[in-house]
């Protein structure tokens, strides 16, 4: 427990040392800036949040508008990955990129000082998490690396000192993304199937024995409701990133761990009513250039189109949410972050500091804003008014 407290103090010192510089301390300027953020959220101004690398090489999570200007910057002690937003309270939770061990809860309206916490000994985060419907609890995908099993850590984040109150099995190895289902009780987890250990960094230890799956878990009891495996012959397709439609259909992007000469389908969907994965293909001429890697998956606001980014291949792919049919692709170097912009459009972020609007899948995305020197990380999340 002592080492945990040391970790937490270190994280808080790091966060607080940068909050004043970001204009979010209890100064008059910070207060005005926070009020501006709150007004923007209340007025419906489109705001987005994402982890990024700063021009000086440090890391942060930032809230920005469509003008590309910062509304809030929270320094991080290392590289971040995803940010999850509580729709009830508006608070955000940012996680370290695996195998990192830090997480930060913050209020984009500036109502409270960010609260940091660390993974317990023997665990590390995978970069993703989810809130309970009321925002009191958070669920984090974690690695129990001694036992080579995936777990979901459960945290009470209702106060200013988040604390771990339990865990349950993820239903597989290498849990990555985790999302709430529309019923508000069930969690869906993408178990990527890859075993890793912090002593060997990001080295993959079990490529010949991978078993990726999608798991459904009762968040109130931790009970595993069921799992669904990928297609036979695709055991090396690590299931990673997801989005869930209002119809409970789950869209999943994969990262293939086989030979680069092999180009299997990378997109899948799961209808709990069907109980199986469906694979969704793309044209043969596009496959080799994607480098077998999907980085983010997002539905637009009206749920008609699914976007999937391929940053290593420099493309964004689009699929029909009705039947999974391939629609089109766009070329954009190192584009990875995806978020809904309006009913049908997407906002896209890239590693060069740009934000782009993709209004139609068959047309190139239009530059909205650019920031020299920064690099947006893998994921981009739309903020919305609480409640």
Image: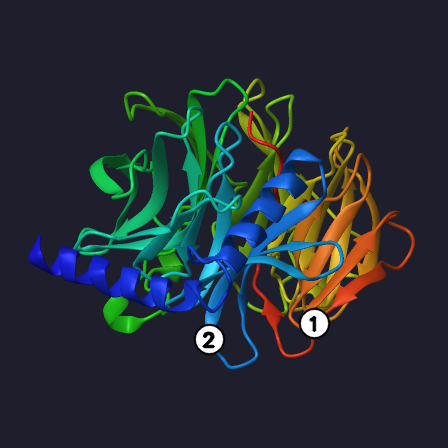
Query: What residue appears at the point 29 percent right and 60 percent down from the top-left corner?
Result: 12
Q: Quadrant of residue 377?
A: bottom right
What residue does disc 2 label? 58
Q: Residue 278: horizontal and vertical position, in percent?
A: 63, 35
- Disc 1 residue crowd, few under 14, some 14–19, many 20+, Cα 10 Å: some
Secondary element under disc 2, as helix, strand or loop, is loop
Whether 104 is drawn above or below 335: the answer is above
Q: Residue 21: horizontal and vertical position, in percent?
A: 47, 69
Asked whether 150 or 6 is in front, the reply is 6
The answer to whether one can see residue 108 in this image is: yes
> Mark 1–mark 2 contact, CB under 8 Å?
no
Secondary element under disc 1, as helix, strand or loop, is loop
Query: What residue appears at the point 28 percent right and 72 percent down from the top-left corner?
Result: 200
Query: What residue appears at the point 41 percent right and 68 percent down from the top-left corner?
Result: 18
How many marks the image carries: the answer is 2
Whether 274 is drawn above or below 70: the answer is above
What residue does disc 1 label? 371
Query: What residue appears at the point 45 percent right and 42 percent down from the top-left corner?
Result: 111
User: Residue lying furthest left in this view?
Assistant: 2
Number of the label disc, if any, that sits on residue 341: none
Is 137 on the left-hand or right-hand side of 307? left
């Amino acid at each position: 427990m002592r080492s945990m407290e040391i970790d937490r103090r270190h994280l808080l010192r790091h966060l607080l040392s940068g909050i004043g510089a970001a204009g979010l301390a209890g100064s008059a300027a910070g207060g005005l800036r926070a009020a501006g953020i709150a007004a923007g959220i209340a007025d419906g101004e489109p705001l987005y949040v994402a982890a990024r690398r700063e021009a000086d090489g440090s890391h942060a999570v930032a809230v920005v508008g469509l003008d590309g200007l910062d509304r809030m910057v929270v320094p991080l002690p290392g590289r971040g990955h995803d940010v999850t937003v509580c729709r009830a309270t508006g608070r955000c939770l940012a996680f370290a990129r695996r195998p990192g061990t830090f997480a930060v809860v913050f209020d984009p309206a500036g109502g409270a000082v960010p609260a940091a916490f660390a993974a317990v000994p023997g665990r590390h985060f995978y970069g993703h998490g989810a809130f309970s419907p009321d925002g009191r609890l958070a669920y984090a995908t974690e690695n129990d690396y001694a036992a080579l099993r995936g777990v979901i850590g459960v945290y009470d984040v209702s106060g200013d000192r988040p604390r771990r109150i339990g865990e349950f099995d993820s239903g597989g190895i290498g849990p990555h993304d985790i999302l709430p289902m529309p019923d508000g009780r069930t969690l869906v987890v993408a178990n990527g199937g890859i075993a890793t250990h912090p002593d060997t960094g990001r080295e993959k230890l079990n490529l010949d024995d991978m078993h990726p799956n999608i798991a459904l878990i009762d968040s109130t009891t931790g009970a595993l409701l069921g799992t669904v495996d990928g297609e036979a012959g695709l055991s090396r397709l690590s299931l990673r990133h997801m989005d869930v439609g209002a119809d409970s259909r789950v869209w999943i992007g994969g990262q293939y761990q086989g030979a680069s000469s092999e180009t299997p389908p990378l997109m899948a969907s799961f209808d709990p009513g069907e109980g199986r994965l469906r694979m969704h293909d793309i044209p043969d001429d596009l496959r080799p250039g994607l480098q077998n890697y999907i980085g983010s998956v997002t539905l637009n606001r009206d749920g008609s189109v699914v976007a999937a980014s391929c940053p290593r291949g420099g493309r964004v792919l689009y699929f029909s949410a009705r039947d999974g049919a391939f629609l089109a692709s766009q070329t954009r170097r190192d584009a990875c972050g995806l978020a809904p912009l309006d009913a049908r459009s997407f906002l896209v972020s890239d590693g060069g500091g740009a934000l782009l609007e993709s209004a139609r899948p068959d047309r190139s995305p239009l530059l909205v804003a650019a920031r020299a020197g920064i690099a947006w990380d893998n994921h981009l999340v739309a903020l919305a008014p609480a409640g």
